[in-house]
Image: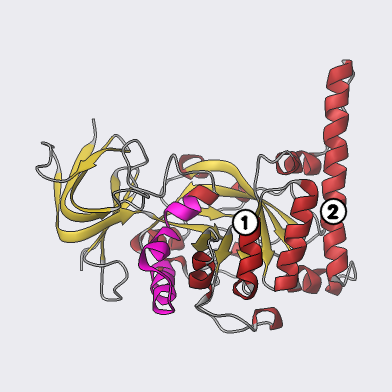
């Protein structure tokens, strides 16, 4: 039986109730066994938190970690495959290098889980995986696969495929997505009809097979969209087909927050620690996550690694607070909210008995730039200890 007790810490559970107290937490066999105030239980291994703060492990729900390897160019660039506009059959788990140095750096920054996958070159780019930031193989690290399907609107697919003289306009992008969704619905009907009639099923189409969970409402569609008009197109198509959209980046979402709130669609906000490198992010602001969360929109924060290194996710949270975001909302934007968006609240995102023992011990307030990450636990094992 592997167990460790962490005591003398202020615990931020990130749950809706009893979210802050001074006490202890017991990690046993990879899970949170118990936590509470007062006298802690006996344990063979004890870590004194020395008055620090304990939070759930941080989560970045939109990342390309492991698909763009640190310090490499073409050899380690496996995030975009633009040989055709629609590639839902591509699987992130086949391109991730779990030994990339950025996994180690992510843990040192307090990040214990990511949802990582293809970039935004394609109209439909492929399947994301939810995974821990520690493990010796993808199978060892995976929490959920597939975790989402990727789609993209706007400047990125326009630029990539206009260069190939495939299409040029936002209308074409929408048409490509609609056409694939219609083909998938027809493929789904033919499978069900063949089964009902006892006939031979249609020939397997591995591209449409990957889209079946999307049209059946079983898998969220992560939609890269910066401009407000692209966000509206994403919402329009999602309503047409009964999809489960998650807006990624949403750079202009703060301009139409009231309209997005009516749809109750999550927005994964960021990266905003960057320059305005292309026209569609001219309205970039680090005030955005605060505006969105105050409007009642489920709001997560991303650094879009490797656009901004994943180890800087805590800094993105600090900047959101400095720009007006509520402190609790900001911490929830990298813990409980992304866990809920990903459908993983029963595993990660908060400190509660029965959940995975992923937690971060901070020397003080996690929102203070001078605070250090002292220890990071993944599945109950200390996978990072600060030595300096």
Q: Quadrant of the C terminus?
A: bottom left
Question: How many C-alpha atoms fall within 10 Å of the one at disc 2: few (<14), some, or many (≥20)?
Answer: some
Q: Position of residue 209 (x, y in %)?
A: 77, 38
Instruction: Tell me the residue at 30%/76% (across/down).
Output: 369
Q: Which residue is mark 2?
A: 178
On screen, residue 122 versus residue 189, left or right, reads left
Question: How many C-alpha atoms fall within 10 Å of the one at disc 1: few (<14), some, or many (≥20)?
Answer: some
In the image, is residue 328 part of the stretch drawn in magenta?
Answer: yes
Between label 2 and label 1, give the one nearer the viewer. Answer: 1
**Closest to the observer, 19 or 195:** 19
**Closest to the observer, 324 or 53:** 324
Magenta stretch secondary structure, dominant: helix
Q: Quadrant of the N terminus?
A: top left
SS at mark 2 in the image: helix
Q: Is 256 drawn above or below residue 193 in the view shown?
A: below
Instruction: Tell me the residue at 34%/35% (across/down).
Output: 354
Q: Quadrant of residue 152?
A: bottom right
Q: Which span is picked out in magenta?
A: 312-339
Instruction: Tell me the residue at 85%/57% (across/down).
Output: 176
Q: Is 190 drawn above or below residue 20 in the view shown?
A: above
Q: CA distance from mark 2 to mark 1?
A: 19 Å
SS at mark 1 in the image: loop
On screen, residue 105 versus residue 197, left or right, reads left
Q: Is residue 68 visible?
A: no
Q: Which residue is mark 1?
A: 265
Q: Along the polypeptide, which appears first: circle 2 or circle 1?
A: 2
Q: Is 140 drawn above or below residue 294 in the view shown?
A: above
Q: Position of residue 356 (x, y in %)?
A: 37, 41
Q: Position of residue 246 (x, y in %)?
A: 63, 56
Q: Is 216 drawn above or below residue 68 in the view shown?
A: above
């Amino acid at each position: 039986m592997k167990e460790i007790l962490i005591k003398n810490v202020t615990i931020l559970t990130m749950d809706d109730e009893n979210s802050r107290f001074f006490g202890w937490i017991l990690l046993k066999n990879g899970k949170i066994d118990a936590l509470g105030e007062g006298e802690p239980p006996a344990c063979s291994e004890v870590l004194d938190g020395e008055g620090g703060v304990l939070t759930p492990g941080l989560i970045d729900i939109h990342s390309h970690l492991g698909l763009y390897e640190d310090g490499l160019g073409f050899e380690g660039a496996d995030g975009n495959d633009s040989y055709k506009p629609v590639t839902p059959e591509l699987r992130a788990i086949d391109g991730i290098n779990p030994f990339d140095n950025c996994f180690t750096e992510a843990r040192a920054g307090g990040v214990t889980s990511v949802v990582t996958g293809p970039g935004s070159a394609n109209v439909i780019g492929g399947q994301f995986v939810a995974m821990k930031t520690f493990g010796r193989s993808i199978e060892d690290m995976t929490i959920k696969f597939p975790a989402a399907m990727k789609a993209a609107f706007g400047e990125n697919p326009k630029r990539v495929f206009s260069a190939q003289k495939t299409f040029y306009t936002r209308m074409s992008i929408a048409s490509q997505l609609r056409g694939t969704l219609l083909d998938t619905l027809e493929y789904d009907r033919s499978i069900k009809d063949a089964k009902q009639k006892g006939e031979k099923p249609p020939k397997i189409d591995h591209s449409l097979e990957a889209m079946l969970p999307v049209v059946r409402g079983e898998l969220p569609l992560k939609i890269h969209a910066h401009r407000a008009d692209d966000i509206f197109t994403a919402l329009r198509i999602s309503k047409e087909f009964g999809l489960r959209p998650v807006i990624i980046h949403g750079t202009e979402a703060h301009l139409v927050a009231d309209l997005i709130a009516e749809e109750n669609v999550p927005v994964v906000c960021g990266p905003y620690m960057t320059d305005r490198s292309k026209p569609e992010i001219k309205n970039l602001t680090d005030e955005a996550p605060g505006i969105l969360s105050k409007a009642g929109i489920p709001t997560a924060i991303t650094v879009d690694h490797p656009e901004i290194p994943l180890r800087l996710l805590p800094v993105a949270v600090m900047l959101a607070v400095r720009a007006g975001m509520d402190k609790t909302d900001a911490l929830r934007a990298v813990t409980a909210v992304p866990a809920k968006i990903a459908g993983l609240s029963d595993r990660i995102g908060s400190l509660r008995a029965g959940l995975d023992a992923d937690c971060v011990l901070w020397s003080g307030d996690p929102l203070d730039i001078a605070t250090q990450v002292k220890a990071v636990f993944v599945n109950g094992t200390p996978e990072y200890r600060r030595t300096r």
